[in-house]
Amino acid sequence: MNSAATSPAASGQALDDFIAGLPKTELHLHIEGTLEPELMFALAQRNQVKLPYASVEALRAAYDFSDLQSFLDLYYAGADVLRTEQDFYDMTAAYIERARADNVRHAEIFFDPQTHTERGIAMTTVFAGIARALRDARLKDGFGSAMILCFLRHLSEEDAFATLEQALPLREQYADLWIGIGLDSSERGNPPEKFARVYGRCRELGFRLVAHAGEEGPAAYVSSALDLLKVERIDHGVRSEEDPALMQRLARERIALTVCPLSNLKLCVVKDMAEHNIARLLDAGLAVTVNSDDPAYFGGYMTANYQAVARALDLSREQVLQLARNGIEACFLPGEDKLALTAELEQYAAAH
Ligand code: ADE
Ligand code: ZN
């Protein structure tokens, strides 16, 4: 072994390579957040939608966010180019290509029907386009996936109920994919309790339940998502650290947090990646996972998210591996599929 191979830079490169090949699960991914500027422009042209940006470069340059809301304003505006089933298909197929390149084996994908039905796009169009791409990918090489329908929390609970009613007739047709319910959009001022009744109904219907909480909102939103919405996983949850009793509960009950490092940096949840608390959460025994949230807007997909935290926090190979193990533990696959993925992961670790 030459001396360069043992230098810090070389070992950083070795960890980057290890991360790139690691079999991964993705549990926090908004499909509308995968719409890259190039595809957004292509769809705008196809559908004769005028974008308020002169070029792909000008659009990318606008991705300079100060908080969650400043991002959401652009994200909802960008989604306006999605009009037909083929548009939803193309967006989803493009994401799958990126995910495959990052060795993602299984992705549980959020979609926001209200963003589209509010604009007059049919619920069936949204489901059909996303599901066709996921099914094609499954047939092609076994790419695993599931769909999680998210309610927009800045809208009313009544609107969420109406959305659920609109989607339920499609449940059987998409039973192989649509497994869960989530809650996203503007967190502050829209606490989990606003959606307690509709979550109660979704629970009766047998959906797996998750919710965004503790991204910009306080740790109390994480507790109420658990107690009132009865979610199984928390999306983000980084502010849980502000409540020691909650931290103990999350560790004891192995309630997973789907953390999104590059998102947290871009939305100013953390000032610097070196200040991210994911390593502390991991060390406290929480089932933290790494995810990409809205990768087209935040500058990186799964591998980039892992590499960014590994570098900034000087994570060990074992810590990286534990994050990947947590991702398998926290996913909604049946036990035998989790075992198979775990075996693949451990085999990879032993061989690299
Ligand atoms: N919708 C898309 N990305 C989101 C995020 N990071 N938080 C809340 N809502 C979202
Ligand atoms: Zn999110």
Image (cartoon, rainbow, N blue to C red):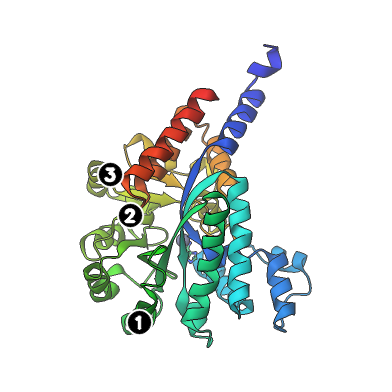
> Which residue is found at the position 47% from the left and 44% from the top?
276
Task: Check disc 3 and report the residue beneath it.
Answer: 254
The image shows a total of numbered marks equal to 3
Q: In this view, does 269 lie above or below 325?
A: below
Q: How crowded is mark 1: few (under 14 residues within 10 Å), some or many (20 or more)?
A: some
> Which residue is found at the position 39% from the left and 68% from the top?
188
> What residue type is disc 3 on?
Arg
Q: Which of marks 1 and 2 precedes in the sequence? A: 1
> Which residue is found at the position 29% from the left and 74% from the top?
195
Q: Does the residue labelled 2 lie within 8 Å of ligand 2?
A: no
Residue farthest along the bottom direction in this orientation: 120
> Could you give the CA–CA distance between mark 3 and mark 1, rounded to whole angstroms?
31 Å
Nearest the camera: 99 or 298?
Answer: 99
Where disc 3 sits, the SS reads loop
Occupied quadrant, residue 147: bottom left
Q: In this view, does 8 lie above or below 110?
A: above
Mark closer to the observer (2, 1): 2
**Which numbered marker is on residue 156?**
1
Task: Check disc 2 and report the residue beneath it.
Answer: 233
> Could you give the CA–CA distance between mark 2 and mark 1, rounded to whole angstroms?
22 Å
> What residue type is disc 2 on?
Arg
Residue 83 in the image: state x and y as whole percent.
Answer: 61, 81
